[in-house]
Image (cartoon, grey):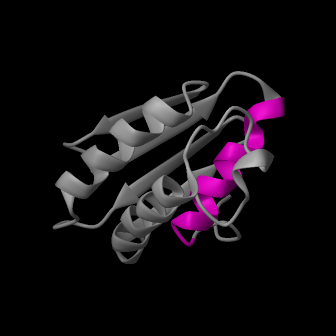
Amino acid sequence: MTDQAPAAIPSCSLSPTGLERQGARYARLAPDVFAARRSDLALEVTFAEGYDRDTLAELVAVERECCPFVELRVDDGERRLHVGVDDPANAPALEAVATALGVGSRTS
């Protein structure tokens, strides 16, 4: 997750180098975001056809390790990423993901 300091994201365990690498993954995926929808506790991102599935798989694997409080699901058939949290205190993580994918202010 990028654009927010790790301290602002509850329990994020990425090092500065890890954060930089994860940010690069988000940057590679951002141009392929087709649509995004945000609620208080969830973010749904749909990618355009031809998006980099390997990068998304790596991004999700890293997020699961560094931010275990975030629920991540990928639906390959729908080209969709679901990011959710159970606790509103963890909602800054959703904003960080949305911002990293360039959809922070475009979600509804």
Question: Residue 78 vs residue 16: left or right?
Answer: left
**Vertical side of 84 occupied by 53: above or below:** below
Quadrant of res 1: bottom right
Residue lying farthest right?
89
Instruction: Please provide percent x and percent y for residue 98.
Output: 60, 59
Residue lying furthest bottom: 31
**Picture residue at 41% right of the left edge, 69% below the top:** 24
| Nearest to the observer: residue 107 or residue 90 | 90
**Left or right: 53 with respect to 104?**
left
User: Residue drawn 36% across and 49% down?
Assistant: 59
Horizontal relation, residue 29 to residue 9: left or right: left
**Residue 43 at x, y = what percent?**
58, 45
Task: Assess whether residue 99 is covered by the magenta stretch.
Answer: yes
Q: On the rendered image, what quadrant is the C terminus found in?
A: bottom right
- How many marks the image carries: the answer is 0
Looking at the picture, does residue 97 appear above or below residue 91? below
Residue 60, quarter of the rendered image: top left
Question: Between 51 and 12, which is closer to the camera in this rendering?
Answer: 12
Q: Which SS does the magenta portion mostly show?
A: helix
Find residue 105 and report its image quarter.
bottom right
Q: Is residue 40 visible to us here?
A: no
Left or right, 95 with reference to 26: right
The residue closer to the viewer here, 53 or 35, is 53
| Bounds of the magenta segment | 89-102
Q: Is residue 26 visible?
A: yes
Q: Position of residue 37 (x, y in %)?
A: 58, 53
What residue is shown at x 28% (from left), y 47% (from top)?
Answer: 58
